[in-house]
Image (tube, grey):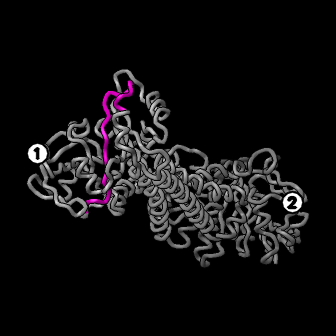
Amino acid sequence: MFTIIQTNLRRRLARTLFTASGIAVGVATIVALLSFTQGLKDTAAGFVHLGGSDLGVFQANVSDPTASILPESLVARLDATPEVSRATPLLLVTEALKADPSAIVFGAQPSGFFSQGLVLLRGARPQGQEVLIGDRLAASLHLRPGGVLRVDGHPFGIAGIYHSGVLFEDSGAVLSIEDARTLTSRPGEVTDIVVELAAGTRASSAARKIERSFPGTQVITDPDQALRAGANSTLISKAILVIVVIALIVGAISVANTMAMSILERQGELGLLSTVGWSPVRVASLILGEGVAVSTLGAAGGLLLGVIGGGLLVHALGVSAYVSPAITAWGLGRGLLVGVAIGVLGGIYPAWRVTRMTPLRALSNA
Amino acid sequence: MSEEAGAEVLVEHAGKSFGRIGALDDVSLHMDRGEAIAITGRSGSGKSTLLGLIGGLERPDRGKVLIDGRPVWLDRHPAQARRELVGFVFQRHLLLAALSARANVEVPLIGAGVHRAERRRRALALLEEVGLADRAEHLPSELSGGESQRVAVARALVNEPRLLLADEPTGALDSVTSERVLDLLFRLRDRLGMTLAVVSYDPDVAKRADRTLTLIDGRIGDTGEAGIAQA
């Protein structure tokens, strides 16, 4: 049986490759989008734990967390809350670097735990109108200490290069919150306040208390919450889901159509197998086996394509500072499962048709 | 195989229509074990349909078909009956183009779940029997029409059938090759003792058969003894 499956697929090499390619594209789309979604989640996780914080306090009901606006006075009030160990404000400046519009510039208090937690790789802490830059940004723009970074058109001397381990931070730059306010013309305002909790405090209970005590705020403690909090992120997640479903449907219909055509062309051959005593189940197994073999081939190619395509996608969209596609075993497994399922589903109808056909009729169509 | 190895065939008042077109009407036929009959008739007279009913390739609308007293369609799946009892040879050899002659002969054994080594042994033995041992690994495209038909005969015999049904087996062959294929069919029938039914226009088939059956418009028109060809 396996020999016949292998031989049939080899004999119709062009059809096999085209069918496998169709499945590969579908699987690649799924893998790339799933890795994109996972990357989005990882990015959101980084956004939640900026500066190694336990949670972030944002304005409630904003379309995107980066669009949040909170009064700076809230920092002291949060600091006074028993559940909070330390709180420090951040003012996010987006699209401020012409060379890399996706990079985020963080305005932070030099004495706050956000700035203090950055690991300096080269250079020194900033003095006056200077900036620290993340190692990923330094590498992508070929910057080094002593150079100049233009933020919103204003020149800042590069004092040093840091690494934090958070994609957002390492792809961006940090300057003083006063400089950030000057650039954005937002006196007395911050984007969010990052919080370290007192020892033994649970993030969820602290979040509830903060939201009750300070109406108009939302506290984000986990990546899923971060994704849900931003309307844009939610939109992206939903759009990805829709695209994945469409890819699945198109892939399944395409494979079913190709396999049905293949079966119609091979009625004589299948009629012969039935004539010489192959049971309908065995003939159907042959067809399904071919479907599974083609889809496995396509799925394997699709996994490879998806891994490469995922990386290319974020670069093409210019969102590499926000999202780094994260390939997980579960993501690859889902892609593989979907690919094989497409082959099985696509083969069921033609297999069923064959079992309904009498051998004599099939032979007369040969 | 002895003459007892042949199957007894009984067709009782069988009828078959395809849509509104009647192909067979009230056909009854008895074939003794090891008997060889020639089935003749004009095109569209129902010869192939009768062979299809006997071999379980089509289900009769009316009447019944029994092989060794057992209905082909009622007490087991016809695929099983075909696998265990019947071998088929058609006008076209219907060999699978991508498989070698040996692999083509093995195909029915794959359906029967026979182990690979045993399949190979039986296929090679039969190819030797039909004089194609040296062509075992050749593809159908590398064989002549007569050679391909001999491979088809080997394929029909590989399950050791008790009933061999041949539908115009020489229809696509020249006269010399036809004679060789007929020699092969009747020699194997004599040696293995199987029951044989051959649909053919060829008068030579009627001469070789024990009996001739002529179909006219889906009904049995005439029968004759060996050597008497029916028009």
Q: Is residue A210 left or right of residue B107?
A: left
- Is A31 in the magenta? no
Residue A122 shows which numbered tag? 1
Q: Chain of mark 1?
A: A
Q: Are marks 1 and 2 on the same chain?
A: no
Q: CA distance from mark 1 to mark 2?
A: 91 Å
Q: Which residues are magenta?
A: A78-97
Q: Which residue lies most toward the top here? A: A200
* Of B57 and B176, the residue lying toward us: B57
Q: Under tag 1, what secondary structure? A: strand
Please, what is the three-letter code of the amino acid marked with disc 1?
Arg
Frontmost residue, A261 versus A256 = A256
Give residue A67's position: percent from left, percent from top.
Answer: 40, 52
Mark 1 or mark 2, which is nearer to you?
1
Above or below B64: residue B184: below
Between A54 and A333, the residue placed more toward the observer is: A54
Q: Chain of mark 2?
A: B
**Is A60 left or right of A312, judged from the image as shown?**
right
Residue that badge 2 annotates: B61
Residue drawn at the location 16% of the way across and 56% of the way down: A156
> Which residue is at 69% across, 54% downward?
B86
Q: What x and y, as percent, mark residue B83? A: 66, 50
Asked whether residue A215 appears in the rendered view, the answer is yes
Q: Nearer the viewer, residue B106 or A9?
A: A9
Total number of numbered discs in the rendering = 2
Three-letter residue code for mark 2: Asp
| Residue B105, visible in the rendered structure | no
